Amino acid sequence: MRVMVIVKATNESEAGGLPSKEMLTRMGQYNEELVAAGILLAAEGLRSSAKGARVKFTGTQRTITDGPFAETKELVAGFWLWRVDSMQHAIEWLERAPFDEGTEVEIRQLSEPEDFAAVFTPELREQEERMRVQPIQTK
């Protein structure tokens, strides 16, 4: 199963603060362990919400709100994408993460094509597989 491990923002991360060299070193070692175990699929840190925007959809109307956003505890500072055997397996790995006191992390299972079996037509499945095979173009 695949899970997204979501690292919640803090006042410091929202202020644009960067991790210390020590934390980056510990996190790098932890990420190497995840790679060696065949778990890590992707990992990224996010810039503060001051560099972001929100788009709210109401019918055909789109409302754009530029960051920063006030409610820090609801924001994401970074994420991992993991392939694990179970939710318990993900929790066991996360318990080993070198976070400082007060860090909050959420683990969420990703939806897989099988989860949409009733509405996932062969054409939609083919489209999904085709998109996953093609390399993503960046500017």
Image (spheres, helix red, strand yellow):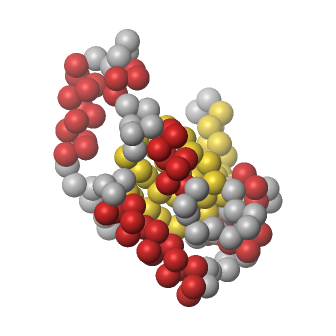
How many numbered marks does the figure carry?
Answer: 0
Identify the residue at horizontal 61%, vertical 85% (top origin).
Answer: 20
Is 120 on the left or on the right of 78, as rendered?
A: left
- Residue closest to the eye, 55 or 16: 16
Residue extending furthest top?
A: 118
Above or below, 114 against 82 in this view is: above
Above or below, 133 against 72 in this view is: above
Identify the residue at horizontal 27%, vertical 59% (top origin).
Answer: 137
Tell me if residue 63 can be seen. Answer: yes
Residue 138: x, y in percent? 31, 64
Above or below, 109 against 123 in this view is: below
The quadrant of the picture occupied by the N terminus is top left
Residue 50: x, y in percent? 68, 69
Query: In which quarter of the view is residue 8 placed?
Result: bottom right
Residue extending furthest bottom?
A: 21
Residue extending furthest right?
A: 70
The quadrant of the picture occupied by the C terminus is bottom left
Query: In which quarter of the view is residue 110 placed?
Result: top left
Tell me if residue 67 can be seen. Answer: no
Residue 59: x, y in percent? 62, 29
Identify the residue at horizontal 28%, vertical 17% (top origin).
Answer: 121
Residue 131: x, y in percent? 25, 42
Identify the residue at horizontal 47%, vertical 65% (top origin).
Answer: 44
Is 109 on the left or on the right of 112, as rendered?
A: right
